[in-house]
Amino acid sequence: MDKENKSLDKLETRKILLSGVKPSGHPHIGNYFGAMKQFVALQDDYESYIFIADLHALTIVQNKEQMNNYIYNIAVDYLAIGLNPEKVVLYKQSDIPQVSEMAWIFNCITTMPFLMRAHAFKDAEAKNKEINVGVFGYPILMAADILLPGADVVPVGNDQKQHVEFARDIAQKFNNIFGKTFKLPEPMIFENIGTIIGTDGQKMSKSYQNTIELFATDEELNKAIMGIVTDSKDVKDKKEPEKCNIFNLHKLFSPDEELKDLRDRYVNGKIGYKESKEVLLKNVVDFIKPIREEREKIQKNREYILDVLENGGKKAEKKISEKMEEVRTKIGLSLK
Ligand code: TYM
């Protein structure tokens, strides 16, 4: 047995963690603090399955080159932030055909009114967007992602909480019809980081163009941070830190002492927004520079990246295909 397999075998008694990121753009610090950071922090404590949700991205990314680049880049990003492919099963969702098969089976036991409760669907409908069937069935595919490897916990931001709850409901429904097959997963959301706020005060999101990208250049960081929206208070005005978009970000990047000092200066009218942004910019650059440099090194090694995904895909498929066989038998598709 090689070293890698041995280390994975040792993980068997641990609880299972699973999560993914959709390759539909560059990840931002909301993705990082809300979810990706936890993948790294917990990789020793859980048997972890972390994947690239490329089939989910297909609901929006419908261009070959773009899809190729986004997938590759998320793989590089995962490694650059410190995911270790010897500890974590790192894979591409579309490499595991059983996930799509399982999603179809879940389609057949899920009602339309149930899916119509999904926030993402309701938002798209409220905005009069053209909604493809993939968007409507998005939570079903997520349920397949989560339930097949037997996830106990799913670290995500608040915006994905409902999807994990849907996966629980779908698991329960399947279990009721066909007998106990799936574990009921729990969303794992940490206090104060469930929703990271963007430069305009709304939830940080690619679709609101209010993001600070995780691997941005110093110049891009400068532009994003100096552009943070504030009220028009003067340096000497007393300010409410909790209502300030800059201060919200300080909480992620400032050491405790500095944060306390900044808070005092805010409430006593001893700091202006310009200076506050400059402090934030310095801290963000200090944080991002080393991971950006690491990323640049890894990115060049295409062979290695493809290898990591291929190996991860094999390990994930091994785990998932066992559960899939059980499902086929339970629902009567298998004649063996
Ligand atoms: P995605 O790619 O939109 O986002 C990846 C992760 O980042 C979190 N996130 C945030 N957290 C805090 N504050 C924010 N402003 C913020 N913006 C994004 C998301 O909650 C997410 O955890 N559907 C998923 C991908 C997926 C998945 C799964 C996740 C597919 N299958 C199974 C978990 C389990 C998505 O589009 O995430």
Image (cartoon, rainbow, N blue to C red):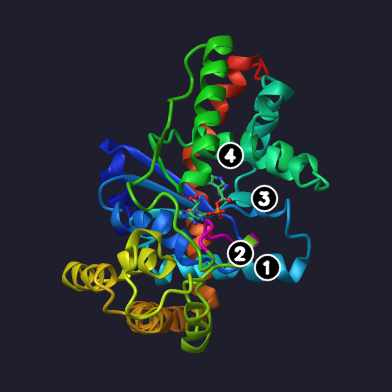
For marks 1 and 3, the one nearer the N-term is 3
**Residue interval drawn in magenta:** 201-207
Proximity of marks 1 and 2: CB atoms separated by less than 8 Å: yes
Q: Is residue 190 visible?
A: yes
Amino acid carrying mark 4 in the image: Met
In the rendered image, which quarter contains the C terminus?
top right
Proximity of marks 1 and 3: CB atoms separated by less than 8 Å: no
x and y percent of residue 41 in the render?
29, 56
Q: Nearer the viewer, residue 114 or 53?
A: 114
- What's the CA distance linking mark 2 and mark 4? 18 Å
Q: Decide: few, some or many residues near mark 2? Use Cα within 10 Å; few <14, some 14-19, many ≥20.
A: many
Would residue 16 appear left or right of 50 to someone viewing this image?
left
Q: Decide: few, some or many residues near mark 3? Use Cα within 10 Å; few <14, some 14-19, many ≥20.
A: many
Residue identifier under label 2: 71
Proximity of marks 3 and 2: CB atoms separated by less than 8 Å: no
Q: Label for residue 55?
A: 3
Amino acid carrying mark 3 in the image: Leu
Residue identifier under label 1: 68
Residue positioned 31% across, 69% down in the render: 238
User: Is-magenta flag for residue 204?
Assistant: yes
Report if the beta carbon of the residue with label 1 is closer than 8 angstroms to ligand 1: no
Proximity of marks 4 and 3: CB atoms separated by less than 8 Å: no
For marks 4 and 3, the one nearer the N-term is 3
Report if the beta carbon of the residue with label 4 is closer than 8 angstroms to ligand 1: yes
Q: Secondary structure beneath disc 2?
A: helix
